[in-house]
Amino acid sequence: MGSRWTFDGHIAGIGTTSGLRAVVGIWQDSPFGSFSDVMVQQPSGHRLLLAPTPEVAGFIAATYSFDEVRVVDVAALLAGHRLTVDAGPLEIRAVTGARTRLGSVLQAVPRRLAVHPRWLAAVNPLAALAAPGARTYGTAGSGRAEFYGVTDLHHVTSAVVTWEGANAGTLSPIRPAVTFGFSSVPPRPSVARVRTTVVEA
């Protein structure tokens, strides 16, 4: 086994009626310190990474697939039930609801087990049934493998999303699924507590 990188924080998935879909990573602890990034898939299918530094952009772009990468100021804050994101052309103001039923089930699994790569590889088939499009384990770019350990989940109940100053439409399911990597976020907009582990063979 080669290098290993661990990212601890939250992932928010947002869909809009215009077809714009965004996946926001809010990382409290990572090899790059605390940072946020946004993966955007436009209605045309164009995949764009918005990252705060060239170093972060290089790592993410080597792990996932994008048509365009931009280094911009990215500010994302999850406080209570409110999510705010300002990332170059993208602005999100969202509200989350109570913990979901799946979130309660996830919380029942001891965290040390729930984020362990072996456990995540074993439960991967079940993850696809619980949240269509989502996976807990798969191969990534640059000969890497990736593990998603989700330990909590809250639905997004409302959101105002603008792209380049224009309203992107009302909150909507994330359909079609995003195609940055082997896994999408759940179809229903949500915020997940997650530990992501990337390993290099």
Image: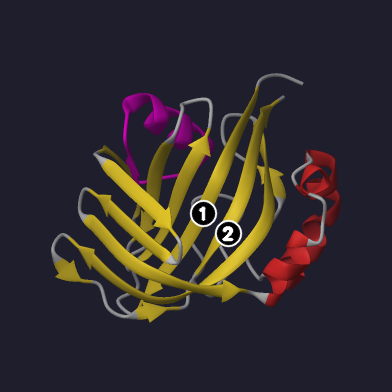
- Percent x, y of residue 132: 66, 71
Outermost left residue: 165
Say above or below: 197 vs 173.
Answer: above
* Residue 66 lies in the magenta stretch: yes
Q: Is residue 175 visible?
A: no
Return the residue nearer the eye: 64 or 38.
38
SS at mark 1 in the image: strand
**Image quadrant containing the N terminus:** top right
Q: Is residue 35 above or below residue 19?
A: above
Find the distance from the CA under tag 2 to the CA under tag 1. 5 Å
Q: Disc 2 vs disc 1: Cβ atoms closer than 8 Å? A: yes
Image quadrant where residue 43 sits: bottom left
**Residue bearing the label numbered 1:** 11
Residue located 38% across and 61% down the image: 83
Amino acid type shown at disc 1:
Ile
Residue 80 image position (x, y, % from top left)? 45, 62
Left or right: 129 as drawn, with respect to 142 = right
Is residue 104 part of the magenta span, yes or no? no
Task: Give the magenta range.
Answer: 49-67
39 on left or right of 125:
left
Could you tell me which residue is drawn at 30 percent across and 45 percent down? 75
Please state which amino acid type lies under the numbered disc 2: Ala
| Quadrant of the snapshot with the C terminus | top right
**Which dot marks residue 192?**
2
Q: Secondary structure at mark 2?
A: strand
Which residue is at a point 71% across and 52% down the rendered structure image?
136
Say which residue appears at 49% left-offset and 51% top-offset.
Answer: 180
